[in-house]
Amino acid sequence: MRFAIKNIMWVFAASVAIVFTSSAQTIKLSVPPRTEKISEEKRTLKDTITTYEYVYNSELSKDEIIKFYKDVFSAFDMHDFGKSRGDDYMFESPPEKIAHVIFTSPQSDGKTGFSVIIYEMSKCPVLPYYAFTSPEKLDFAPVYANSMQFAKSSYFFPMTGVGYLTHSSFEEVVKFYIDDMASFGWTLSERKKNSGMYDFSQWILIVDPFTKAVPLLEAQGYQKKTPPLKIKGETLVFKQNKKKCTITVYNFEDIVEKLEGTIWDAGMVKQYGNTAIIVYYFSE
């Protein structure tokens, strides 16, 4: 579930060139001509992703820089995916490699500023490990005690969204909300079952409902490389005057076993639980 979270897989600050690659074939970037390297930094995230960040100023034009990187990326079987918006350029290959190029604002000295970030991935986390915290108290709904919060945002105001994982059973969580929402003045108005086998395009939207990356991920082969998951789900719709709160509970019964051996890292599900609680509160 994304909300305001910077999901490691596809949500990054603008103004960078992004490369995803498997550890089997590290991309070593050469510096374009008439280009100065400003900084370089290496980070390791949960032993699954190593990042190398390079910041540059160049006398080259944007077109010259893009041509340079087209030649570099083609050597790693990464082909031009096209200009998606503004100064946003993308290159793609099989799932483990993606390049995303965006330039910074024009420099005062007339040079072209840009960054390159290389991601060496052995696994891609389904949810970012760093996002998990103890659940915050809510003023509009009870909080399930035996859970860990991985998302909270009011970015899409007047909606507030909160996401949790728990080791508790699907039935225990559903019963908790049916029993306890009344103490916050809510009346249960609807129950909707939504269980079954979910393919990649379906279950990734459960985990990250606001992502716009599904078509790109499908184009890169994730649909074929990721097996369908067995999911038990139910949505509870509560109303209070003009306000509405929906609580959807999902149990990912076989996610850890099914994603074993794929590019996906479901370790956080093993650590925090395979039952997800997704809360949406609409204030008006």
Image (spheres, grey):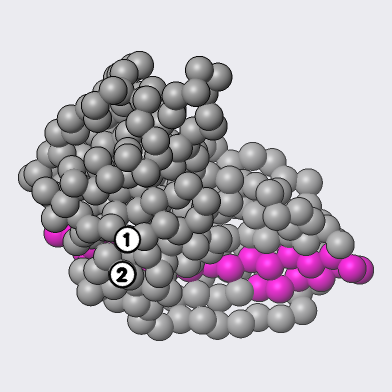
Asked if one can make out residue 170 in the rendered structure from this viewpoint, the answer is: no
Q: Residue furthest left?
A: 24
Classify residue 271 as left or right of residue 238.
Answer: left
Classify residue 54 as left or right of residue 22.
Answer: right
| Rendered view: 169 above or below 127 | below
How far apart marks 1 and 2 lie (CA) works out to: 10 Å
Q: Is residue 44 magenta-colored?
A: no
- Whether residues under marks 1 and 2 lie with C-beta atoms below 8 angstroms apart, the answer is yes
Q: Which kind of residue does numbered mark 2 sit on?
A: Ala
Residue at the (61%, 82%) spot, across then down:
192
Q: Using the image as rendered, state which of residue 95 and residue 180 is in the foreground.
A: 95
Extent of the magenta region: 236-265
Residue at the (47%, 53%) spot, across then down:
165
Q: Which residue is mark 2?
A: 219
- Circle 1 or circle 2, nearest the eye: 1
Q: Which residue is mark 1?
A: 81
Residue 37 lies in quadrant: top left
Q: Residue furthest right?
A: 241
Q: Which kind of residue does numbered mark 1 sit on?
A: Phe
Asked if one can make out residue 278 in the rendered structure from this viewpoint, the answer is: yes
Expressed as whole percent of the image width and height from the top left, the position of residue 210 reads 55, 61
- Mark 2, other Cα within 10 Å: few <14 / some 14–19 / many ≥20: some
Residue at the (19%, 33%) spot, across then down:
29
Classify residue 189 as left or right of residue 199.
Answer: right
